[in-house]
Image (spheres, rainbow, N blue to C red):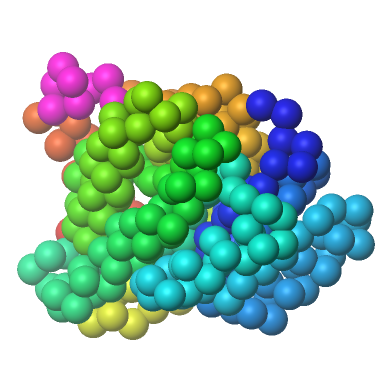
Amino acid sequence: MNFKDKVVVITGASSGIGEALAWEFAGRGARVVLGARGADKLEALCRRIEEQGGRAAWCATDVTREEDCRRLIETAVERFGGVDVLICNAGISMRALFDDVELGVLHRLMDVNFWGTVNCVKPALPYIQKSRGSIVGVSSVAGLHGLPGRTGYSASKFAMTGFLETLRIENLKKGVHVMIAAPGFTASNVRFSALTADGSRQGETPRDEGKMMTAAEVARRIAKGVGRRTRYLLMEFDGRATWIIKKFAPALLDRLFYNHMAKEPDSPFK
């Protein structure tokens, strides 16, 4: 796909992978429409993009609110005439055993990661059907196999995957491309804001950021995947291995995931 003048809507766009996606698609000539809760950050980001010769618009968006998601899509239509690509990137994580976690934390994860996707796809779908465009869900390896210590996160990403797979099938005759992107651990701020057992923010990551894929690299691969109309985008060896081992040795995969997560500093398994 040539992204010149295509309209790309991105949620969770004020930082991390979302901000990297904004720069990536703007650099490829797309007109980007950015949604996140932080209006000041969005406005500043759009200004910087336009100073670099890009075209951008923004709308303060809490993806758990249907009316906010509708306004985001309306902003894209009013400013640029439609929607060609919708990237549902907004998301939060968690880190706690299910034994200890308050159920409100899981509700919050579902509201943002699953319902946030549904809320944005609903108003955007008629425009994407018209343009025969793309819907992208930024999922996770945790959406391929249950990730211990992240029950709410895995559940929400599995739900996102099921929703998007079904949407793909329903739109087989309408030319809509649906891609599920599954980054591994990424050097972004998602883990800093991860929720703990009582719903408070983790505040710092237990993992070495230097060994992770950068948000810019994730954005580059997502753009490439949209261009190729890829169905599933597994970005790392761990993700591809998970996909294969799950088919042939799921019990082994359970043990591998448990042992891997138990090695985290301050692991809840200890």
Q: Position of residue 255 (x, y in %)?
A: 15, 36
Q: Nearer the viewer, residue 85 or 136?
A: 85
Q: Is residue 43 left or right of residue 49?
A: left
Q: Quadrant of the C terminus?
A: bottom left
Prevailing secondary structure of the magenta residues: helix
Give the x, y percent position of residue 12. Answer: 53, 63
Q: Quadrant of residue 246?
A: top left
Quadrant where the image shows the N terminus: top right
Q: Is residue 174 visible?
A: yes
The spot of residue 230 in percent (x, y) is 48, 25
- In the rendered image, residue 167 lying in the magenta stretch gets the answer no
* 238 sits to left or right of 102: right
Q: Quadrant of residue 254?
A: top left
Q: Is residue 3 above or below residue 68?
A: above
The residue drawn where x is 21% and y is 69% is: 106
**Residue 122 in the figure: left or right of residue 77:** left
Rendering coords of residue 197 (x, y %): 22, 75
Residue drawn at point x = 43 percent, y = 75 percent: 67
Residue 66 falls in which quadrant of the image?
bottom left
Q: Nearer the viewer, residue 49 or 256?
A: 49
**Residues in magenta?**
243-250
Which residue is at 63% across, 58% downward? 77
Please name whichever residue, 16 or 22, is drawn nearer the observer in this view of the structure.
22
Residue 14 visible in rendering: no
Q: Residue at x 78, y 37 (%)?
A: 4
